[in-house]
């Protein structure tokens, strides 16, 4: 029987994960299936349990359940602990839980490493010492801040609600160089990452024109069929590289696949074609 994996979310119909993992499985010759699982908003834990009883071996977790998945897991990887959120679950058999031999639910988070791979491997950016502005201070930022600091970026955070950014900065300051945006900075950044959910409402978060020049790489963590308001704003400022989060989506999936199957798929064709024409 094929190994069974899936992604749990609400909504879930739009998810590209089943197609991405099917592609990875075919490419690497892994015998597995991957389904989309719609959990009721108050039924995440039940959905995961049922999936396991039916033979599930691992699950991705998406909006709005990443924090709940963190709470559900018996044990967390260090990157999940930093993110305080889980996007990849797997079960470890024969583990010691409360003095008994049971199976253990392990919570991992591959979002940060996914973004980092997209920036450094795919976009060939050198983050060591890079002046990086992050827009936003929500869960999406928490998931990626640790790896970005570890890569040596000098990070400035701007958020509509400054208090949320202050909290986050105080929790991550020991890991590297991260500060809050000053009142009216005239600095131009090497890289700006829009990690707000503003693009989902076709909104533009605060972004001053002087922060961007032709060389500023402008990255929206949201992926979309057409440029987001942030990407459009950046392009109008002359930024030559305006990128959405499709590469991050693929890379976080590849890392989850590696966690489960121990095989690292090649992501280049998927990212180049954006799935079009690769499969039905
Ligand atoms: P996520 O998990 O997607 O990060 P979240 O934790 O709710 O979701 O955080 C959403 C982020 O997008 C926050 O930084 C939020 O700003 P606030 O902290 O001020 O709420 C930001 N955000 C959402 N909509 C926005 C908008 N229209 N303009 C600017 N920032 C916005």
Image (tube, rainbow, N blue to C red):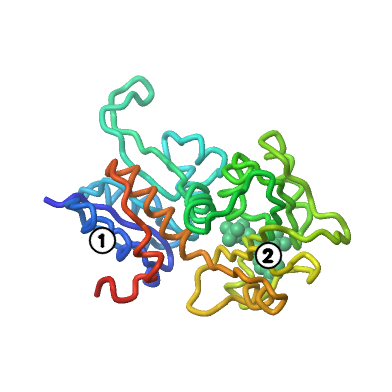
Of circles 1 and 2, the one toward us is 2
- Residue situated in front as seen by the camera: 247 or 51: 247
Q: Give the residue drawn at x 48%, y 57%.
A: 122
- Residue situated in front as seen by the camera: 200 or 242: 242
Identity of the residue furthest to the top in this view: 99
Can the viewer see residue 43 in this picture?
Answer: yes
**Coordinates of residue 237 in the picture (x, y in percent):** 72, 75
Q: Name the residue under label 2.
A: 215
**Coordinates of residue 141 in the picture (x, y in percent):** 62, 53
- Residue situated in front as seen by the camera: 64 or 135: 135
- Residue situated in front as seen by the camera: 100 or 61: 61
Tell me if 240 is positioned left or right of 184 in this view: left
Position of 18 relative to 91 (above/below): below
Q: What element does badge 1 sit on? A: helix
Q: What element does badge 2 sit on? A: loop
Within 10 Å of disc 1 (Cα), the crowding (few <14, some 14-19, many 20+) is some
> In the rendering, which numbered label is found on residue 268?
none
Can the viewer see residue 111 in this picture?
Answer: no
Within 10 Å of disc 2 (Cα), the crowding (few <14, some 14-19, many 20+) is some
Sequence-first disc among 1 and 2 = 1
Quadrant hosting ligand 1: bottom right
- C-alpha distance separating marks 1 and 2: 37 Å
Q: Name the residue under label 1.
A: 22
Q: Give the residue drawn at x 30%, y 44%.
A: 260
**Coordinates of residue 136 in the picture (x, y in percent):** 68, 59
């Amino acid at each position: 029987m094929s190994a069974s994996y899936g992604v749990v979310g609400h909504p879930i119909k739009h998810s590209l994960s089943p197609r991405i993992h099917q592609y990875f499985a075919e490419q690497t010759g892994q015998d597995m299936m991957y389904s989309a699982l719609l959990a009721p908003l108050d039924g995440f834990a039940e959905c995961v349990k049922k999936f396991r009883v039916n033979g599930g071996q691992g699950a991705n977790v998406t909006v709005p359940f990443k924090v709940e998945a963190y709470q559900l897991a018996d044990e967390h990887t260090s990157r999940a602990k930093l993110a305080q959120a889980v996007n990849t679950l797997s079960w470890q058999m024969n583990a010691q839980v409360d003095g008994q031999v049971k199976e253990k639910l392990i919570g991992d988070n591959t979002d940060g490493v996914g973004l980092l791979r997209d920036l450094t491997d795919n976009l060939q950016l050198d983050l060591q010492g890079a002046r990086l502005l992050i827009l936003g201070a929500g869960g999406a930022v928490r998931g990626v801040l640790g790896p970005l600091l570890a890569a040596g970026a000098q990070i400035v955070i701007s958020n509509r609600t400054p208090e949320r950014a202050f909290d986050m900065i105080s929790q991550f300051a020991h890991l590297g160089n991260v500060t809050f945006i000053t009142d009216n900075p005239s600095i131009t950044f090497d890289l700006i990452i829009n990690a707000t959910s503003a693009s989902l409402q076709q909104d533009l978060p605060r972004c001053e024109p002087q922060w961007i020049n032709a060389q500023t790489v402008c990255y929206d963590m949201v992926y979309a069929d057409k440029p987001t308001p942030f990407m459009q704003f950046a392009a109008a400022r002359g930024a030559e590289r305006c990128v959405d989060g499709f590469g991050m989506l693929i890379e976080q999936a590849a890392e989850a696949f590696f966690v489960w199957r121990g095989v690292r798929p090649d992501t280049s064709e998927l990212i180049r074609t954006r799935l079009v024409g690769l499969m039905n």
